[in-house]
Structure formats: C-alpha cells, structure tokens
Amino acid sequence: ADIISTNLASREGELAEVFNPTVPGKSVYALFAFAAINGFDHALKCLAGDVMILINDVAQVIHGEVFRWGFGDSGQCNKNLGSSTRVVFATSEVKKVNVKKRKIASHLRKASSELSNPFDRLRTAPNLYSGLKSNMHMKKHDAMADAMQLSLQSLPGISTFTDRAVIGMLKSFAGIHRDNKLRAWSRDFRLSAGVGAWSVNMIFGMDAGWAVEGAVGSEYKIDATYLSPHVNMASRMMSACKHYGVTILLSEAVQELMSEQAKSKLRNLDRVTVKGSTQVQNIYTYDARSKGADFFLYSRSDDQADMEAERYQPNIWLDDQDLKAMRHHVTDDFEQEFMTGMKYYYDGDWDLALERLERANEIMVDAAMEEGYLHDEMDDTPDRKELYRTETADGPCKYLISFMKSHGGKAPPNW
C-alpha cells in the first residue's frame, strides 16, 4: 500500500488520485522468498473454479505467519501468482543506510583530524577545493553501486531479522499441515481419485540482497513490485527444491546472515552456480517433513503465537516444538554420515562419497521404518515396502547419488 500510495498524485480539477509514472523507485535491502503449492497443476485441473478457495486457504496461513514473524512488521506477501506467493522482508532503504554510513565516516575523520598534528592540517588546506569536488562526486555516486557493495552482515540486528524471516517460512509450513481447512482438502475426492492420497504441501526458496522497489503500470492497473537478481534467485531456490527433494532452500547469502544457533540446524546440500550467474555458492536446507510430525498437537491461539514471536530468542531453534517436530526424522548418525559423504564429494573422491551418501540414505529410511509412524499405510507386499522406502528416502542423498552416477561415479577433471 505504501509503495502504490507514493506513486499516486491528484490532477488539477479531478477528485480522484491517478498513477504517476514519473515517480522513481527506491533501492532497498531485503530478504526475498517464494512459497509454492506442490502439485498445483493437479489441483487446478481437478478443482477448476474451487481452486481459488484452496489458494485463499493457503494465503490465510502464509500471510498471517509472514506478518507475525517479520521483524517490526516488515514481512509482507507482496504478490500472489496463483501457484506461488512472493514474500518480502524489507530491512532498510539503501539511501538511509548510506546516509548513516557517511555520518559515521565523517565523525571518524573529524575525530582523527583532531588528534593529528596541527601542521598537517595546515598542509592539507590548499587541497580544500579538490576535496569539495571529491565530495560532490561522491554525492552523485550511483546508489545502486553502493547497494551492491554493502555487506548485509554489517546491518545492526540482521541475524535476528533473518532468523525471524526464515522461521516465518517454516511456521507457514507447520501451519498448512495444522490448519483444519487445509487438512480437509486431503479428503476431497476430486483431488485423491486416481492418484491416491493428496494433501496440501509447499516448498520455499529464499535469497537476500538489494532490490528496486516501486509501482509499475498505468492509470488502469498498478502493481507494487521488486526488481532484482536476488528476487530471481529466491525463485530459483524454490524451484530447485523439487530437484533436491526438500521443503526449503536457502542461498548462501541468507545462511551467512543467520544466528549461530540457526546455522547449526541447517544442512549444506551442494555448491552450485545458477542460471544467469557465474558465482559459485553453497545452498542450505532446514530439514522439514510433515509425515509423523503432529503439528496439530502444538496448536496455539493467535495471541499466543504473537507473544511467542515477540519474545523471540535464538534458542528457539533448539526448543520450539514445531521446528523440532518437522526435523524429527534427522538423526545424529545420519548427519555425521551425510557430512562425511559431502566432504568426499567436494574433494572429488566420489567412490567414497557414493558409499557414505548411500549409507546416510539407508540410515534415514531405517529410522523412519523403526519409528513406525506410517505403519497403518504399510502392508507386507514387497512392492508396497519398496514404495515406502522410496517415499522416506533422503531427497538430497538421492539427487547427489544420481548426479555422480550420471558422470560414471568419477569427478570431472576440472572438479
């Protein structure tokens, strides 16, 4: 609303405000996320017009959690694309950050000058004019260049801001598996007929950086938008969830901004470059599954949930029932085996990497079978047991094993 209202102006003799296309956008720092409904094409085909009810049921959960966990009301679901939602957690305007940086730099220069030799100050006096020219040049410096050069880690409170944004996504995941309206969709015959059980599930992708914020359109239609490669990166992170078989993917830029407690719960899945970028970056996930996670047991009122968000502390990553429940399938043995396999994978020793990752995958499957939380869905037929093993396997292990085998199990020479 603020973005659009900034671009509205009144014309002389008219009562209504109209879109002003000459208002420039402003550069901001933000965390960007995309949240998508899994199997949306199937839902659209089966539900036809009723798919709008499903979308709104999902939006009710996501909008609430994003607003609740966005630090200082910074979280907003910026655009609904039908199957997915673009989420923005805006931290600060680039212009305001640069003003603060210049004030600090000026203060430090002044303090340094007062401590220096007075004769040094006299010697620098003849260069006053050139200094003024330099300052004028700095004022004209491209704000976008400043935005791209600033490390977001230097922003005060950024770890709390980022932790809360990621928790907003994870709480959305828990919420859609707890919400009674969304759970009811799994009993809709139109969705389950011919394909077995169907339930609402989601995937998420996140990145952090700068963007140009503004309104685009005409007097007929106005949209608030964010333009940035970081927005595109968040979308690609979301899409890559399908390849790695995970619920959420975080870019390296997001991981670097999180608290140490949060980082300890993330799993490094790969080191990649994405389309449109030559930069190599690590990607991470917070392991999250709904099977066997009784989220409905941890239901709370809106007031209780709001109070929980207001009282945020980094130890939430260790104590929160929702976060623990969605990660219940991850054991210490699995983590150790996976980390060892990844070390061999990065080192190019793919024989040992395959051995360790296959073992890690077996640990994941065996742990799920021993828990027995899907016992009612199993029978003794070999086909059903094999299907169960496939469904409970670790997505990243399967993807990396398949990738290495597609290269003959040997790392390329330039690896």
Image (cartoon, rainbow, N blue to C red):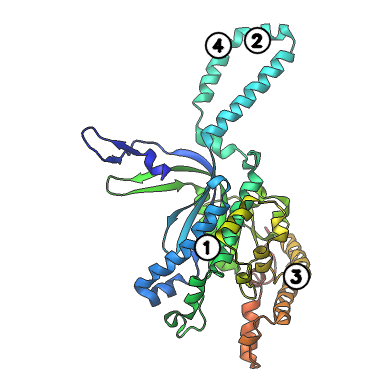
Q: What is the quadrant of residue 251 in the picture? A: bottom right
Per the image, label 4 sits on a secondary structure element best described as helix
> Which amino acid type is marked by label 4?
Tyr
| Dot in front, 2 or 3 | 3
Sooner in the amino-acid sequence: mark 3 or mark 4: 4
Q: Which residue is mark 3?
A: 331
Foreground pick, 219 / 235: 219
Q: Which residue is mark 2?
A: 124
Q: Which residue is mark 1?
A: 239
- Determine whether 5 is above or below 372 in the image: above
Foreground pick, 346 / 214: 214
Per the image, label 2 sits on a secondary structure element best described as helix
Label 1, label 2: how many angstroms apart (C-alpha)? 57 Å
Foreground pick, 302 / 186: 302
> Which amino acid type is marked by label 1?
Ser
Tell me residue 395's x, y (percent).
63, 71
